[in-house]
Amino acid sequence: MALFRATPLMLSLAAAWPAFADPAAPTLDTVQVTAHRSEKPLAETAPNASVISRHKLDDRLARGIADAVKYEPGVEVATDPNRRGNAGYTIRGIDGNRILMLIDGERLPEAYDGGGNGNGAIAGRDFVELETLRAIDIVKGPTSSLYGSDAIGGVIGYRTKTVDDFVPEEQGVGGNVKAFGASADNSWGSSAGVGAKGERADAMLIYTHRNGHEADNMGGNDSATTARTAPNPQDWRSDNLLAKLGYKLTPQQRLELTLEHYRRDTDSNLLNTLYPAYVSRGRPVPAQQAQTAADRTLRNRVSLSWEARQLGPLDRLAVKLYQQKLNNADNSYSLFGNQSQVQSNYNFYQKILGLTLEAEQRFNALSAEHQLLWGTDLSRTDTSRPRLKTQYNANGSTSNTIGGETFPSKTFPDSTSDRVGLFVQDEMKFANGIALSPSLRWDHYKMSTQPDQAYANSGGQPVPSFQDSAFSPKLGLSIPFASHYTGFAQLSSGFRAPPFDDANMAFVNRAYGYQVIANPNLKSETSRGIELGLKGQWDSFDFGLTAYQNRYRDFIEQASLGTINGLLTYQYQNIGRVDIKGAEARAAWRFAPGWQTQASLAYAHGQDLDNNIPLASIAPLSAVLGLRYDQAQFGGEALLRAAARNNRVAAVAAMPGSTAQSPGFATPGYATLDLTAYWKPAKRTTIRAGVFNVFDRKYWKAADVRGMAANDVTLDRYTQPGRNFSASVEYQF
């Protein structure tokens, strides 16, 4: 708890800021939805909640989720440069499916990172088109009291555009067309949207197309070998269609149907996987002379929502029924020196059917104004991982037994997860401005399996069903003082039931002498957190400070059990205890008409308590300093990003299966400068351009090189692009 002993000093420094003590604080129109499951001005939320607005996404020319959050303290996106691209979010050192992702309040599918077909994970979580978004809400830290399982590390809440973004008036037609391009991956694309409002009905349609190639880096080895550091040649394309139809049943009641289709296809020439012939365990292994991949990500969603305002004693009542479907296809073709060929078709399917109900009610009681929020989340998730591989031999024969495995196969049986959640939150605001926000959620989770022949081909071990229930409380307190300051304190908890892959993984490969066995005694992961924060706001200056400590228990990790029945045996167990503490700060100063400077800082310290080693997912100290100028027809922004050297890196295995250790790669510190500008040559036209990494600095993101050794010859493959450019032109009508 040493971190929190520094908090009074931070508060004292903030309170000593006299130069910007203007008579009154401005009202911000930015709204934070995800942190409270209801609309709330960002200025009234704790500092652990932030919003990336449409305005920022446009002006900073964000191409994908890594660009969207690169100026957000404490948040990063890991990227695989070999084949997969962006994986998912890391928030304060917690990543993967421990981060809940929502789109318009609906659960998004999960990631899967095991049993892939070369080069890492098969299924990341980069399947949302940024051009459809009006904002990204980020909540850092345990949030299970409102969202249940999977929000143990935080929440990413996407909010898509509405017809009001195109037609702000009561009736009419509006829209926009936009074209964009970037040199970092030689990509280009276009987007068009239109909205129409009538007396009772409205409609909106957005279509976006993108094309691109491999992302640039600073690797100089372009050989067709495993030592290659230049990017693999790649072509990709994506299409997204979002449609919304709304109808007012009465002035206070509205129905809305949402349809969305997203598809991305990626073709890769995996030159970094090619190798010469060699001998393994006394057996000759033929050279791999070629490997190509054709990967596809397909996500569809449909939802129907009904919302009523001022319905009897309720200020708002909303019900939504939704379905999300994800189909990730991981297909590859390999040619070997003995002229045999292998065709692989791996898939990851997930379907989510969900129902949410939310009710809000405002009333006065016990000398306080109450905003009561309560509701329920119901969902069923079906997950499947079919794997098919066929070998075509030089003599014309074929085989489905390859590398000791029989195909088709599944590394875990088809799984169904049922979630039931009940939540309530009461935000009590007293006459002196103090707000107390207790919340409580109860969740019941059940997972069952459906073994089939494909699963039997992988060993067919019995996998037990799993069920668990948990209460997740949270208590928030905000105290305004000295006219311009608000202090925050928050106690929170989280839990995460064992996921489909960890809980159900059971797999045998006798040819290579290993197996993964099921664990019927797995428990849910849990977290506890404390956070202290301070916000201050004047007409020309605002700031936010936060200090936190989160303790995670029963993390599920794979453990080695030694040799059982002649096979190296592994099992997923509750062996992880993690402690993460840190501090974040941000400030903005509007020092002259049109001019603003801003700064942000993030520091975290994470420890794996079981092994007494640094937590690999913790990013080093980072900071952003910006200067922005805006006026009616043109403006621009300069952003300096910096990160310290990542000195807290644990040793890594010298080679797979080895007990020898090598020093981990400590990413060097760096600073890069990004410049963006916009120009409005006509009333409805905006041209934006940017140059990034202006000084062509060679650097690595810590998230991309986790677990890599300092002497790894392929490190340069993970470097970021050098100097690169982006531009867009948009016309609104």
Image (spheres, rainbow, N blue to C red):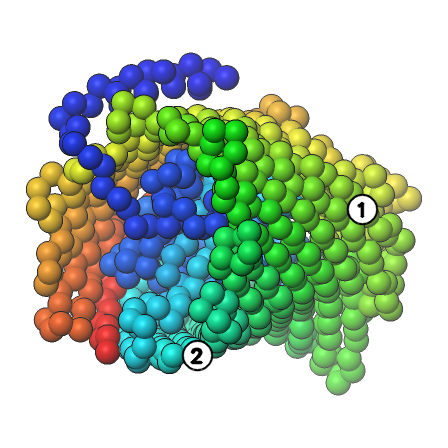
Q: Nearer the viewer, mark 2 or mark 1?
A: 2
User: Please, what secondary structure does the residue beneath circle 2 have?
Assistant: strand
Q: Quadrant of residue 46?
A: top left
Residue 22 position, x and y percent, is: 15, 32
| Residue drawn at the location 73% of the way across and 75% of the way down | 390
**Looking at the image, is mark 2 or mark 1 earlier in the sequence?**
2
Q: Amino acid at mark 1?
A: Gln
Q: Circle 1 sits on which residue? A: 467
Q: Give how far apart the Cα atoms at labels 2 and 1 are.
A: 44 Å
Q: Is residue 724 visible?
A: no
Q: Nearer the viewer, residue 650 or 42?
A: 42
| Residue drawn at the location 30% of the way across and 80% of the way down | 173
Q: Is residue 104 visible?
A: yes
Task: Tell me if mark 1 has few (under 14), some (14-19) or many (20+) residues whose alpha carbon lies within 10 angstroms of its own.
Answer: some
Kindly identify which numbered label has been placed on residue 241. none
Q: Circle 2 sits on which residue? A: 201
Q: Amino acid at mark 2?
A: Ala
Question: Marks 1 and 2: in contact by CB < 8 Å?
Answer: no
Q: How many marks?
A: 2
| Residue drawn at the location 33% of the way across and 16% of the way down | 9
Q: Quadrant of the C terminus?
A: bottom left
Residue at the far bottom in the pictured view: 396
Q: Up-down: is 2 above or below 624?
A: above
Q: Nearer the viewer, residue 268 or 469?
A: 469
Residue 282 position, x and y percent, is: 76, 54
Residue 405 position, x and y percent, is: 79, 63
Q: Is residue 290 left or right of residue 207?
A: right
Residue 55 position, x and y percent, is: 28, 58
Q: Quadrant of residue 520?
A: top right
Q: Up-down: is 440 above or below 502?
A: above
| Residue drawn at the location 19% of the way across and 56% of the way down | 676
